[in-house]
Image (cartoon, rainbow, N blue to C red):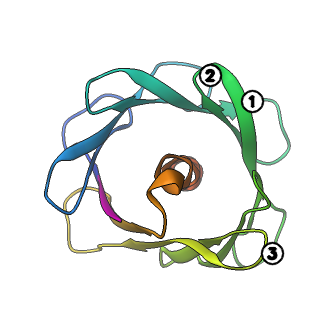
């Protein structure tokens, strides 16, 4: 399953539309005014299904991942000197690749790919392709990508 993650051109807060291969909106992401980033994920019917919430007052950026009201995991930036790195606390997932060039992948606990993420640099707004191996992992992979994007936006 391939998803296109596209930031809206005119918006006060982080707002994104996520499309499938047929160009249909699968998810909508709406940012909310809060201390740190708070991103609400809505399904195609406009119903709230998940949240990515930045934890404040931490040494390094950390984002908690919620499906509904239940926290399912988190992602935190690691302390590194030259290249950004992230620790994912969800299903044994890890994230590897070049975060500066926006070419990375999410791996499961056995080292098998869950998703490949690539940034399209020739767009007016942030645009990514997310190739997810299994449709059931699409929402959680999207949440990881949103957290990494929010951390990068805070750093820039």
- How far apart, in angstroms, are the residues tagged by discs 2 and 3? 27 Å
Contact? badges 1 and 2 (CB < 8 Å): yes
Q: Which residues are magenta?
A: 1-5
Whether residue 66 sits left or right of residue 15 in the image: it is right
| Main SS of residues in magenta | strand
N-term-proximal mark, 1 vs 3:
1
Q: Residue at the location (75% across, 51% down)?
A: 90
Q: Could you tell me which secondary element the residue under label 2 belongs to?
A: loop
Which residue position is annotated with label 1?
Answer: 56
N-term-proximal mark, 1 vs 2:
2
Mark 3 is surrounded, within 10 Å at the Cα level, by few (under 14), some (14 to 19) or many (20 or more) other residues, namely few
Where residue 20 appears, x then y in whole percent?
24, 56
Whether residue 113 sits left or right of residue 120 in the image: it is right
Mark 2 is surrounded, within 10 Å at the Cα level, by few (under 14), some (14 to 19) or many (20 or more) other residues, namely few
- How far apart, in angstroms, are the residues tagged by discs 1 and 2? 7 Å
**Location of residue 104 (image quadrant):** bottom right
Q: Could you tell me which secondary element the residue under label 1 belongs to?
A: loop
Q: Is residue 13 above or below residue 73?
A: above
Which residue position is annotated with label 3?
Answer: 81
Q: Pick whichever, 23 or 154, lies toward us.
A: 23
**Location of residue 105 (image quadrant):** bottom right
Q: Within the magenta stretch, is there residue 139? A: no
Q: Is residue 111 above or below residue 55?
A: below
Q: Pick whichever, 57 or 145, lies toward us.
A: 145
Q: Could you tell me which secondary element the residue under label 3 belongs to?
A: loop
Whether residue 62 sits left or right of residue 54 in the image: it is right
N-term-proximal mark, 2 vs 3:
2
Q: Residue at the location (21% across, 74% down)?
A: 122
Which residue position is annotated with label 2?
Answer: 35
* Quadrant location of the N terminus in the rendered image: bottom left
Where residue 100 appears, x then y in whole percent?
54, 75
């Amino acid at each position: 399953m391939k998803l296109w993650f596209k930031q809206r051109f005119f918006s006060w807060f982080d707002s994104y539309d996520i499309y499938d291969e047929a160009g249909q909106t699968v998810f909508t992401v709406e940012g909310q005014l809060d201390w740190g980033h708070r991103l609400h994920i809505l399904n195609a019917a406009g119903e709230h299904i998940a949240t990515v919430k930045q934890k404040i007052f931490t040494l390094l950026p950390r984002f908690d991942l919620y499906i509904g009201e239940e926290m399912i995991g988190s992602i935190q930036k690691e302390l590194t000197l030259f290249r950004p790195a992230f620790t994912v606390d969800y299903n044994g997932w890890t994230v590897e690749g070049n975060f500066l060039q926006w070419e990375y992948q999410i791996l499961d606990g056995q080292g098998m790919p869950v998703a490949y993420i690539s940034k399209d640099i020739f767009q007016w707004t942030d645009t990514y392709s997310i190739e997810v191996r299994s449709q059931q992992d699409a929402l959680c992979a999207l949440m990881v990508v949103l957290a990494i994007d929010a951390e990068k936006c805070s750093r820039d």
